[in-house]
Structures are given as C-alpha cells and as structure tokens.
Amino acid sequence: MNMVATLAPYPDTTFGSTVYHLKSGGSGTILDINDLCLWYGAAQALHNVQMSVEKGLVTALIGPSGCGKSTLLRCINRMNDLVDNLRITGGIRLNGEDIYDRSADVIALRKRMGMVFQKPNPFPMSIFENVVYPLRVDGVRDKALLEETCERALRGSALWNEVKDRLDQSALGMSGGQQQRLCIARAIAADPEVLLMDEPCSALDPIATAKIEDLINELAGQYTVVIVTHNMQQAARVSDNTAFMYLGRLIEYGDTEVIFQTPKSPKTQDYVTGRFG
Amino acid sequence: MTDAAALQQESVPMSKSTGRRTDMRSRGEPALWSLGGALAIGIIMILGFLALVFSNGVETFIPKPITVVTGIDGTVTAGEPFRSELFKPTPEDFAKASPDWQARIKDANGYANRTLYRMGNFDIYGEDFRWVPDFMAAKIEQPHGLVFVERMEWGPFVGTVKSIKVDGVERPFTTLDDTAFVKAHETARDRSKAIRKIERVGINDVNHALEQERLGLRKVELASGRNSAEYKDAEARLTGISAGLQQRYDALSADVQKLREINAGNTITLAEIGGREKTIEFSALVRAYAANDLSFAQKAGVYVSRWAEFLGSEPREANTEGGVFPAIFGTAAMTLLMVIVVAPFGVITALYLREYAQQGRLVSFVRISVNNLAGVPSIVYGVFGLGFFAYVLGGSIDALFYPERLPNPTFGTGGLLWSALTLALLTVPVVIVATEEALAAVPRSMREGSLACGASKWQTIKYIVLPRAMPGIMTGVILAMARGAGEVAPLMLVGVVKLAPELPVDGMFPFVHLERSFMHLGFHIFDVGFQSRNAEAGKPMVFVTTVLLIALVTLVNATAIVVRNRLKKRFAGSQF
C-alpha cells in the first residue's frame, strides 16, 4: 500500500482531464470502464478512470510504479475482490454487461477472461493438466476435447513443438520463458474474450521476452489483449493503443504511435522521453 | 626522502597493525561456543540414552551361562549372574568374611562387591534372586550339564533334568537334543495349542451364542414384559437352545479333558542344585537349554527364538515373560484409529480457520485457544475422555443400542474407540497449527492463477492449495502420530489394561471391536517396570519393550517421512 501513500500530497488541480485520441480499426468496444474509483482502505488508488478497450486490438497500460495500472487490470477480472478493505465506485462493462453488478457471477466472469501474471505461476501438475485446468474446473471430462484444446492452446502459445513429447511431465521442470508461455496457453485454453497480461515479461530474459512479444503480436486480432508493462519499447512494439497512467489517473489514452511520438499531454511527454518514471 | 615522508610512509602500515582489533565478544565467538556446546550436550544425552536402552535391550535375550557359587557357609547358589554392585556389608556379614577379605574390604573403605544371581525355581525357593557377596563365595564355577528351563508358570527353573516320562512310560534322559525329548516337547506343545484353540474358538463360540440368546431374551423382556406371551415363547426357545449348547460345551470340555490327561502323562522331572525335585508337564515347558554347553549357533538359536516369542506371543507371568504381541497390536490399532480421526478433523478445522473464516479477533482467539490446548496436561484429557466419551457418549450409546446388556457397560467404559478419540483431541492442535502454516505458505500467485482460470475458491483449495500444502500437513500428522503413540497417562483412564483377554480385532462378528479395552506398549513398560511383583525380573523387559517402542515409532515416522518427501519431490523445481 506504499504506492498509494504518495498520492495524497498531490492536489487534484495538477491534473487536467484525460486526453483521448483512440486508434480505430478494432471491431467495436469490448470493455467499457466508466468513472472507476478505487480505494484501499482510506487511500484512493484510482481516480475516475474512463476508458474503453477496442475489441481485437492490443491495449498497453504504461506508467511509473504505483500509478495504478496493475490495480486497473485486476479490476477487469475482479481479482481485487481478494483484497480486504477494498472499495470501488463506477463500473466496468464487458460487452455491455456490468461486471460489478450485484448479481454478476464472478467465477463465470473470470472464465471469459484469461490472465497472465508477472511471475510465471504454473501449477504443480503435468504440462497437460496445467493447460486444461480451466476446462477441468469447468467440469469437462471429454478426453478428446481436452487433448484437442491442449494442442490448440500450446500451438497458440508457440510451445507445442517444444513440449509435445513430454506433456505428462511436471510443468515445474520447464524454463522460466517456457513456463510463462505455458501460462499464456492456460489463459487462452478456454478461448477467453479478453486476455489480461500483468507485466508478463518482467521476470524473463531478453530472448524469452522477444518470444512472448512475438506471441502477443500473433494473438492480436484473435484476442483482445490488455497488457500492463514497465517497458516502453515493449508497449511501442506490441500495442495498438496505449494508456498512460500517473498517480491513479488516466492521463492520456490513444494511438500508440501518437503517444510515443507526439504525445498530447506534457506529463506523457515527460514520461516517454524518460524525464521521470 | 625527507624524514617527515619516511615517517608518514612508516606510519601507514603502523596504524593498520596497531589499530583496534575486533574483540572476541563482538565477533560472537563465546556465543558460538555456548551454542555448539549446548548442541553437543543435547546430542550426547540423546545418544547416551539410546545406547543405554539399546545395549540393555539387545543383550537381554542372549542366553547367559549358569554359575554355581558355593558359599563359605556351605550354601549353594546356582543361577545367571544378573548384575553386580558395590555395597557396605553389615558388621555380622563382615565378621563372616575371611581375614584376607576383611583386610581388602577395609582397604576399600568398607565396600565390597556383590553379585545378584537369578536362581529361578521360585516354586521351591520362594525367591528368584539372591545377592552373593564376593567374600562369601568359596568356589565359583560353571559346571556342564546344568539346564535353564523356561516354564509357563513359576518362572525359569535352573538345575538338571532327572528323567522324562513319555505317554506314561519312563524314558531315560540323554540330552536336550535327543529326538525323543524334542518330539515329546513338540507334541505336548501342539496339544496345548489344540486345547487353547478349543477354548478360544469352540467354547468361546458356545459362550457367545449363549450370551446372545440370553441378551435376546432380555430384549424381549424389555420390549414386552416378563408376563407376555412373547417372553414365554422366547424363554422356552432359550431353554431348548441352551440345552443344545450345553451339549456342545460338554463335548468340547471332554475333548479338552482328554488332551489334558495325555499331557499329564508326558512329564519331565527336574532337580535343583540342592537335589530337590520338581515334575512338570511337557506342555508347561517353553524352552530348555544346557546353558553352559551351548555352541555359538545354539546360542543364536535361543536368542532368535526368544525374540520371536517376544514379538509374536502373549505375555505370561504378570507380563514379565512371554511376548508383547497384544501390546504391539493395541498400540498400532489405537494410533491408526487416532490418525483416521485426527487428520481429517484437524485439516478441515485449519482449512476453515485459514481460508474461510473472517480474520479478526474471534479467529485470533480461537487460534490462541487451539495452541493452548496443546499445553494442557495429558491426564486432563484422560479425565475428560473418561467423563465425556466413556460415561456420557458411551453411556448414551449403551442406553440406546445395548439396553439388554446393562448394567454391564458395552461402550460405557474405557475402550479402543474412546482412547483413540481422547488422543485425537490431545493431538489435534498439532495438526491444526501445522496445517495452517502449510496453507499460509502456499504462494498467493498460485491461488490467483487458479482463480483467474475461473476456478471457484473451493476448486482452488482442492486442486492447488491442498496438494501443495500436503507435505506440511503430513509433517503435522507425523508429529501427532509420534505424540499419540508415546502417550500413556490419559490412556490409563480410558481403556488401556494390564492384560486384555482378547484383541480388538478377531474372527467374531463384527470383527473390529472398538469397545474393547486393549494393551499398549507404553503402559506395558510402566506396568512391567513398576507394577509387577517381580521388579527385578521385569527390568530387562522394560528395556526390550522400550527398544521395541522406539523402533516402532521410528518405523512409523520413517514411513511417513518417505511419503512426505515423495510428495515434496512433485513440487521440486518450483520457482517460488
């Protein structure tokens, strides 16, 4: 919670309203974040975030540490529900459905989204069982379907050729980069509507990172990807739209090229040119 | 080079070498010594204890030579030298010693050595052991031909074999290895086994059937009253059945009687060192060996057969001889039953406390209370077990399901089930604490990964958290088992007995009798060592039983540790 403690001294007036210049080319809006505010206890971590995510595009969230980008990402599949003393106002709509509605089924919601975490977190089971875990918890017992899904997901995460002969071995014996691609395979196994990635390359070496980035480029179009990253070059390489966040606020949101070459907000300018952050 | 420069150059290394050295205290060396010393003392004490127990336990069953001591006053003592010690002779004893010895005792500040001999022959002498001071011994020898005879009753006999009688006919006795002798012994033992089988199975069945019928009648009486037609019918039926059963009983008794008569015709006459004779049946003979004429192989044979008897048979002579099989069985059954109860109960409790309960004051209070439960003296659990489990729960079960047996309690007294439950209560804090720690150690990233896949909380616990926490949970269960297997005090109140007539598992329906009282190795040690008539004879058994208990606990723990390490290996290579 340290990160939010630094928020307090800044008066609201230092921020103007968000600058938008969204790139079109997606097939409509899939996620609609509406005036989202979030508090950890008394400390406010998100201030009136307003953004929509285009279907089929890759959207990057960038910003300095503690700016709330991970918090925002975790709001989308309600992972923040696990945190005590958390309060949220505003709403998020997935294909028009309010996911913070009282009657919303969180478990069903999470099944419609895949999530990849900062550190690879394979489960202590075989590679096969890891990939089909989302289907297993859904009660799928059909072996043919499970095998087909496993192969599709592993091919989708460019891991199939490396592991096809050792699907029954423990996933914990793989390298870090392989583990992260396995986690991506797991995330896309259930064919999610949105793929959320929380700094997926921060624990990986450059070669593994390059592989994951290629993979994200391949997945784009097939899935809607929201990726949080610390690495601005990465955001520039993989994303269509970029959202710059600072101290819990969405400063600028729009075409990645514009953000990195001719940002409209001076704060964004300072950040992408490396003056702070 | 100027003087000043030279001085400066010199002063640089000077200042380094004369600078303050880090003193010993801040380097922590005294602390290291005391820590290492404490560890060394601990290890020495544990190893010393194990060495003492094992050396005593392992050598107990080695056959020892029989020594014959002729005293200066003419008394003859024959027996196994048991142990010796220094003592201060009384003035009267001292006066009996030869002048030579008197001088030696004076040199030793009035102390002399004496040896305890296990003479056996309790039925003749009225004592098993005798101290013989060194200065009272005129002659010490180990003559050939003496035999050490282990008997079913009265303890061992030390002396010589005079004659044997096979099927009523006197036979000359040659040696203990003589085929006639061996065969007579074997057939007599077989007959004893047959008698036991008739008594245990045949007669027991008859008694059981008779008891069932009586209970059936009592049930009818409780249900319809003494004057009802049903009662009259049942009574008439019982009379008929019991007549049949009585016939069966008589037939079996006659068989037993016949075997006993044959046994009475197969005897062996022994003579103690002073010449007094004693005739015993072959069937009462456990083992006989010529103690001073044994080859190494024969000694090994006696040693192995004694261990086999110890591990495989029932105790006799107030537990100071024979085996401890019922105690091994009782300990294992009780521990197993306890684990079956405590493992799921503790794990479920810990799961709720850690995963589901709202972490707050109430949960902290519950947690502290659970931890404190581990510190309650175990005898208190015994009292609780007796009062609540046996009297309240057991009493209710009796009143509900076994009213016809009252006032004889079935479950309303100590027994295997109540002992296991009492120990489960005693060890459940261990399991809860270990499980909670294991659950807390499961990385958050794994739970989140599972939840993000659309797993419910329960599925996450079932598929991810519990398997991952399993090694830690196993550790807790192992600790609970070790604690439970070694606990004695509460068991004395809730079901352990000195001698249980029947095992808790047998061929009689329903095969597992949780209400029966049972024997326990820990209690056996206490009983043999401190409760028996013959404390001296029990002492070696204390060591042997302790060796066995330690070995059993080690075996159980080793098995559990192997299982735990296998589980751990499945999670090896994890990055967290």
Image: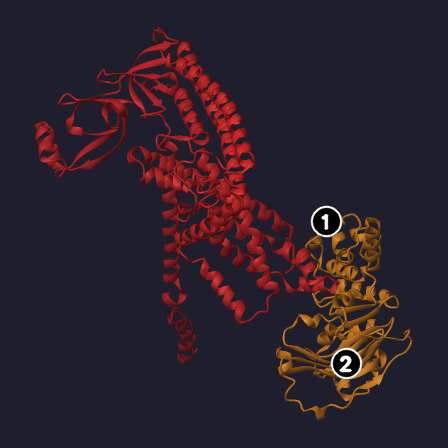
Chain colours: A orange, B red
Depicted A271 relative to depicted B501: above or below: below
Identified by mark 1, the residue type is Gln
Q: Is residue A229 left or right of residue B389?
A: right
Pinpoint residue B279: horizontal percent, then vertical percent: 31, 16
Which dot marks residue A169? 1
Q: In this view, does A194 lie above or below B458?
A: below
Depth order, front residue of A108/B544: A108
Percent across and percent down for residue B253 are 45, 20
Kind of residue indicated by mark 2:
Phe
Task: Name the residue beneath numbered marker 2.
Answer: A244
Quarter holding residue B534: top left
Q: Where is residue B239 in the image (x, y as percent from the top left)?
A: 51, 27
Position of residue A40 relative to residue B541, above or below, is: below
Please check whether the numbered discs 2 and 1 fall on a single chain: yes
Helix, strand or loop at mark 2? strand
Residue B473 located left or right of residue A267: left
